[in-house]
């Protein structure tokens, strides 16, 4: 019997739309806005463009400087410094550039990606413990240590590098809307220069691709599956945030892209590292959970309705109104999980289907008591109380697939 030792302590309210630390709202310093020699420029020095990140040193500063800062009061419970490092609202101020760089990557959002990698490893059915107390045939210490190291590197890829890249590039292209909704965040506040942000985007992107290729070599892949997934995910992250496509302007495309990035891609990464993606079900189930993730993405959009309307972003709460969007959210989360449970039942996995339905019940309860009455006021509370049951449902499904005998 092959199993996966997972870390339940990682399950916290994870994909929450927290805000970074408060900063003074000042113009960006021109001494940090020199061009990067490794990036191509056009011939117009007054309007430089660095692919894939447009970089106009004049227009962005004047636009962002037009708005006064909103309050982001520092918490008094002793957690302000930790909140700053994690990219959470209520954080302390800092001038340390490395702390600000870390804040831009929003470490609190790495957790669902790390969880997704672990679920993918579980779904492979080929992860070995260092010493499995439940299976005497799974106690190869050296093989377990190697799998542990592989899993850790895959989590570093999915979390700090590619999620960090995604969050940084999203903040770059959101600097104008953040000037409306959250002007104390690092970029619109001037806490970090534009050149430093661009360098961070490239470093995380190229570093992530290097790690992905290394995992393919380590896993003995003939085709670089992990690298291909990383390139695809990075492309989705770019078009999600950047014009001209800017998927986030379209509520359906943007929300599903977000759900897919947080659930399907890390699952496929973890499964590819330890096994193979050679059955349709390995794609279908993560995609179904990504549709549920679309519902979670809608919750994140409730708080930004004001800025989205002003900048013409057609998020689902803007398109359908808050009342319409909250029912779409609840339906996406609930009915997709019911569909997954029905599939597990259809392949004879009655116990896992019952576990999944049992984990769905408290989610429905929190929808009725928190989400539907007031999704704007209760968005964070709803996700904090509902999401742990959701992510354990993903884990239960992955374990089921990893242990199911598809040859029968």
Image (cartoon, rainbow, N blue to C red):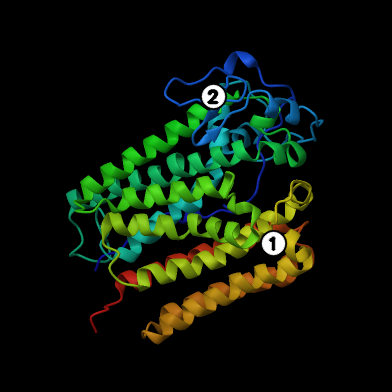
Left or right: 180, with 280 as reference point: right
| The label number, if any, that marks residue 373 in the structure image | none
Q: For residue 21, what is the image quadrant?
A: top right
Q: Please name the residue that numbered disc 2 is placed on.
A: 196
Residue at 68% x, 29% y: name it.
60
Quadrant into which the N terminus falls: bottom left
Element carrying mark 2:
helix
Where is residue 328? Give x, y as percent: 67, 70
User: Total number of numbered labels?
Assistant: 2
Left or right: 330, with 36 as reference point: right
Q: Is residue 248 visible?
A: yes
Element carrying mark 1:
helix
Q: First in sequence: mark 1 or mark 2?
A: 2
Residue at 73% x, 62% y: name it.
319
Mark 2 surroundings within 10 Å by alpha-carbon count, few (fewer than 14), some (14 through 19), many (20 or more): some
Q: Foreground residue, 393 or 162? A: 162
Q: Please name the residue that numbered disc 1 is placed on.
A: 316
Left or right: 66, with 192 as reference point: right
**Can you say whether 182 is above or below 366 in the image?**
above
Residue at 22% x, 46% y: name it.
218
Residue at 80% x, 35% y: name it.
70
User: Cα distance, mark 1 to mark 2?
Assistant: 33 Å
Left or right: 213, with 43 as reference point: left
Where is residue 342? Give x, y as percent: 47, 83
């Amino acid at each position: 019997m092959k199993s996966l030792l997972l870390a339940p302590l990682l399950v916290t309210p994870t994909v929450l739309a927290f805000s970074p630390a408060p900063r003074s709202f000042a113009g960006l310093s021109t001494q940090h806005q020199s061009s990067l020699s490794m990036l191509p420029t056009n011939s117009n020095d007054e309007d430089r463009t660095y692919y894939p990140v447009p970089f106009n040193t004049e227009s962005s500063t004047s636009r962002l400087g037009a708005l006064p800062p909103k309050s982001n009061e520092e918490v008094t419970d002793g957690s302000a410094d930790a909140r700053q490092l994690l990219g959470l609202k209520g954080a302390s101020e800092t001038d340390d550039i490395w702390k600000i760089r870390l804040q831009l990557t929003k470490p609190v959002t790495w957790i669902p990606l790390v969880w997704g990698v672990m679920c993918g490893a579980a779904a492979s059915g080929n992860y070995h413990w260092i010493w499995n107390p439940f299976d005497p045939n799974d106690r190869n210490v050296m093989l377990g240590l190697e799998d542990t190291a592989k899993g850790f590197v895959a989590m570093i890829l999915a979390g700090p590098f590619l999620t960090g890249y995604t969050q940084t590039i999203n903040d770059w292209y959101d600097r104008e809307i953040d000037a409306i909704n959250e002007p104390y965040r690092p970029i619109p506040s001037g806490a970090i220069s534009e050149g430093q942000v661009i360098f961070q985007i490239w470093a995380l992107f190229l570093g992530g691709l290097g790690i992905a290729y290394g995992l393919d070599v380590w896993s003995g892949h003939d085709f670089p599956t992990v690298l291909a997934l990383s390139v695809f995910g990075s492309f989705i992250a770019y078009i999600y945030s950047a014009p001209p496509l800017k998927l986030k302007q379209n509520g359906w495309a943007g929300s599903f892209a977000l759900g897919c990035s947080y659930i399907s891609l890390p699952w496929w990464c973890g499964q590819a590292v330890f096994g193979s993606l050679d059955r349709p079900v390995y794609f279908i189930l993560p995609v179904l959970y990504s549709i549920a993730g679309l519902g979670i993405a809608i919750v994140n959009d409730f708080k930004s309705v004001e800025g989205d309307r002003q900048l013409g972003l057609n998020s689902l709460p803007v398109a359908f109104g808050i009342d319409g969007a909250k029912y779409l959210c609840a339906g996406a989360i609930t009915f997709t999980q019911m569909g997954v449970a029905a599939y597990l039942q259809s392949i004879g996995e009655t116990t896992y289907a019952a576990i999944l339905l049992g984990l769905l019940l408290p989610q429905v309860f929190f929808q009725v008591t928190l989400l539907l009455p007031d999704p704007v006021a209760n968005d964070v509370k709803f996700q904090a109380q509902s999401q742990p049951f959701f992510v354990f449902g993903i884990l239960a499904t992955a374990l089921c697939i990893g242990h199911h005998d598809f040859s029968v």
